[in-house]
Amino acid sequence: MAKRRERLRYWFDNTMSRGTPALIGWLALVTVVMVASFGVLVYVLAGDDLPHKSWSEALWGMLMRAMDAGTVAGDNEGSTLFTILGFTITIGGLLIVSSLVGVLTTGLDNKLQELRKGRSKIVESGHTALIGWSDQIFTIIPELVEANSSESKSCVALLGDRDKLEMEEELRSRLGDTGKTRVVVRSGSPTEPTDLDLLSLDTARAIIVLSPAGEDPDAHVVKTLLALTNRNWRRRRPPIIASVVDTTNLVAAELAGGGHAQVVDTDDIASRLIVQSCRQSGLSVVCTDLLDFGGDEIYLRPEPKLTGFPYGEALFAYDTASLIGIRHPDGSVVLNPPMNTEIMQGDEMIVVAEDDSTIRLVRSFPPIVEGAIARPVRQPTPPERTLLLGWNSRAPKIVQELNQYVSPGSSLHVAAAAVEESDSLERLKMGLQNLAVNVKEADTTDRITLEALDVGTFEHIIVLADSNLEPQHADSRTLVTLLHLRDMAAKSGQRFAIVSEMNDDRNRRLAQVTKADDFVVSDKLISLLMTQLSENPHLGQVFRYLFDSDGSEIYLKPATDYIQPGVPVSFATVIYSARMRGETAIGYRVLAEASSPPAYGVVLNPGKSDSVTFGPRDLVIVLAED
């Protein structure tokens, strides 16, 4: 008997643990039993007090007395027994109704709390899933909104490890209205498989894994990629885009992705861009224009009509688009190939255009003014002097990259409050062939220290953000350094190019008053690159080729090397002149407008028939080997 009682109690406990539905079911059962029992008692013992003396009348009367306490007030004309039975079931009904109200209130509150926590699974398809929470979100989401502006409806689903309401409030305050694009937020761990299921990844168009703030972000990225790789995909796996901060973790991240993820090397791309920007002002503006969705972008386009044409002639095939390379059927990419490269069947054209709808073949080529083409004699590049202010984890790679670009005999002078250990620095120096490195400990925000460095003797100055400080604090110190440098240049009349690394793009707008030549915001550029890859994964090979030190890269070269100054020509003439040098021209920069945002004098992908007149200091933007 005792064992049966234990089993019955165990069964009862299991049903009660099922939550609000089980509690409501038990209350309903108790109500039915109570109403039926009192209905039988009233029908048998006090049936004379019933209007029609029927069983159904007895049940209905007891049900009304159980549900509505006011019904018992009309029982004063019946017998004492009928009144007692009615009053008793009313008391029982009050207990049941109050319990039901409590259960419903608790259940509804729990459901609201669950919704506030963002623990329900979204039901979307064709959406972009963002996994993780970082400042990259505030660059990626606006770009996705811009990319999807032509669609009637689109969705971005975000999974972060913060409170759902906090994330939604921060998104509203920093992004504002997102138009036709809905942003759905869920709270959970990016490395927990059950939490990843909240984003409906099987029906997503693309997945972007974000690097979280804090220590060792790459470890979190690798763990998230492992969770995605080991996931049981019920449909085709969507493209997965991720990034690592440290180059040494790139291989581990690619292995964790199982060959299904494109991993962007933040350290490598940012270091190379800083070095290239310090030697050619305006490069970061060009790269930003190519990577965001607001201006010109890179497209892949099959063009069977160009089959059999050499690449050099195909450069003039589009009026409102710029051909920059070829993608072969096997997926390999070449930018600025030799001009006699024949376009084969199945090749795709890699073009820069404002929109894919503007990419159309021309019927006739614009005229070429051959008399305006300059034919300069190539001069050997003299040794250069570069000043590096500040030091962070990216500095060693910057030194190595700079060594590949400068002429033998060049020098790099480092001034920073703290530099890495002497042993690793000495090993770094031993591997340099063209660059001599001198290091001095100094406070780069101190005016007297900067004046003692004699900054006017350097052709290029690089200002790095201190990675040991909080990003906003580091940017504040960078701004102080830039203000000192520009004031020193204005008072001495000396000219030197300055490129500065910034952590937050909002601080870049503040820094424009310093009139630095270039600002490299690595987080923003990487976020733009990841967004482009999420929309078109096939561009991965193109960007990998573009940002690689081997092969053709983007250069800003003196316009006087291509066109005689002061002579109006069509941009087709500029392309023709660049073609003679084995280069692909894609735009130009007017130095008179170099300080005017947002383009800073950069004109990318002008029309072939557009007229342009270059000044002596203007630049032509080309893809070239060197």
Image (cartoon, rainbow, N blue to C red):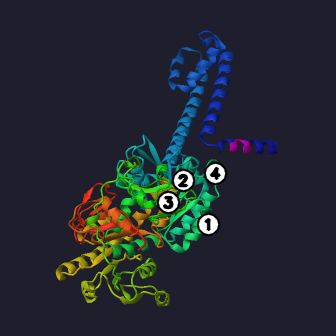
The residue at which mark 2 appears reads as 345
Occupied quadrant, residue 413:
bottom left
Dots 3 and 4: beta carbons under 8 Å? Answer: no
Region in magenta: 9-14
The residue at which mark 3 appears reads as 342
Does the image show residue 447? yes
Which is closer to the viewer, label 3 or label 1? 3
Among numbered discs 4 and 2, the one appearing first in the sequence: 4
Among numbered discs 3 and 4, the one appearing first in the sequence: 4
Q: Quadrant of the C terminus?
A: bottom left
**Foreground residue among 511 and 103:** 511
Q: Residues within 10 Å of mark 3 (few under 14, many from 20)?
A: some
Q: Position of residue 119 (x, y in %)?
A: 54, 49
State the residue at coordinates (35%, 55%).
295
Q: Which dot marks residue 233?
A: 4
Q: Is residue 406 magenta?
A: no
Q: Which dot marks residue 255?
A: 1
Which is closer to the viewer, label 3 or label 4? 3
Q: CA distance from mark 3 to mark 1?
A: 37 Å
Among numbered discs 4 and 1, the one appearing first in the sequence: 4
Three-letter code, disc 2: Gln
Which is closer to the viewer, label 4 or label 2? 2
Three-letter code, disc 1: Leu
Three-letter code, disc 4: Trp
Q: Is residue 165 above or below residue 259?
A: above
Q: Disc 3 on helix, strand or loop?
A: loop
Q: Position of residue 608 (x, y in %)?
A: 32, 55
Q: CA distance from mark 4 to mark 2?
A: 35 Å
**Foreground residue among 176 and 518:** 518
Judged from this view, the residue extending furthest toward the front is: 371
